[in-house]
Image (spheres, helix red, strand yellow):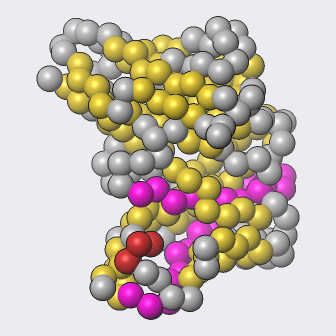
Amino acid sequence: GDSVTQMEGPVTLSEEAFLTINCTYTATGYPSLFWYVQYPGEGLQLLLKATKADDKGSNKGFEATYRKETTSFHLEKGSVQVSDSAVYFCALSVTSGTYKYIFGTGTRLKVLA
Amino acid sequence: DGGITQSPKYLFRKEGQNVTLSCEQNLNHDAMYWYRQDPGQGLRLIYYSQIVNDFQKGDIAEGYSVSREKKESFPLTVTSAQKNPTAFYLCASNTPGWSNQPQHFGDGTRLSIL
């Protein structure tokens, strides 16, 4: 069935370090892919999205490329800040018969000053 | 600005009591969703509705009920049958059928047992 797998957290980095959070997916049809961010005590906010293979989504210095050949959508940022500390969720949506929206389990990022 | 409003932000339930969580959206979205989030966990789908007067069970519907009488409103009732209701509840909405549309989320309601 359709699924999203994220790397286990927490991920702890020093400020200005390079960030990668891995996300792989399994889906029938042609999914759209999303990254969301959740700050403590808040709902999820859309960070970026990509709707077809080889698309690159980007926002606030974060990037992710839709790789169909490896079924991946890894989140990257070149230089993290303390304010990036949050939980990051990878998600997919697909319409293949029925409409599905599936979230990964989330990866907690902690950035130290 | 358009968005999703959840209320209250914090809610306490006594044993044997039903409580209702409010979710209102002014984004003109057809579909609305309720998720449960436990500490350190991902999101689990409780119920969803793709159109007024229609809704479907998600993965963990037992002990919960919903209604969808208006497009903009999708309240969730946590009944006394839900034995472990302490969690963070998130409401979301989007336009279904177009798979490139993200879900928009409210700020959540945190439910605790007294």
Question: Where in the figure is residue B45, as x and y percent of width and height?
Answer: 53, 35
Q: Is residue A35 magenta?
A: yes
Along the line of sight, which residue is nearer the eye, B42 or B68? Answer: B68
**Quadrant of the rendering where the N terminus of chain B is positioned:** top right
* Residue B8 drawn above or below residue A16: above
Q: Residue B104 at what x, y percent from top left?
A: 62, 43
Q: Quadrant of the C terminus of chain B?
A: top left
The front one of A83 and A95 is A83
- Residue placed at 78% from the left, 55% from the top? A31
Is A71 part of what is drawn in magenta? no
Query: To which quarter of the image does residue A26 belong?
Result: bottom right
Task: Say if A100 sits above or below B46 in the image.
Answer: below
Establish if A113 lies above or below B43.
Answer: below
Image position of B20 with respect to B89: above or below: above
Q: Residue furthest left?
A: B114
Left-right relation of B50 to A88: right
User: Which percent across, then down, holds residue B62?
Assistant: 43, 20
The residue at the point 30 percent across, 82 percent down is: A112
Residue occupying image coordinates x 74% and y 19%: B51
* Residue span colored magenta: A15-39
Camera-side residue: B62 or A64?
A: A64
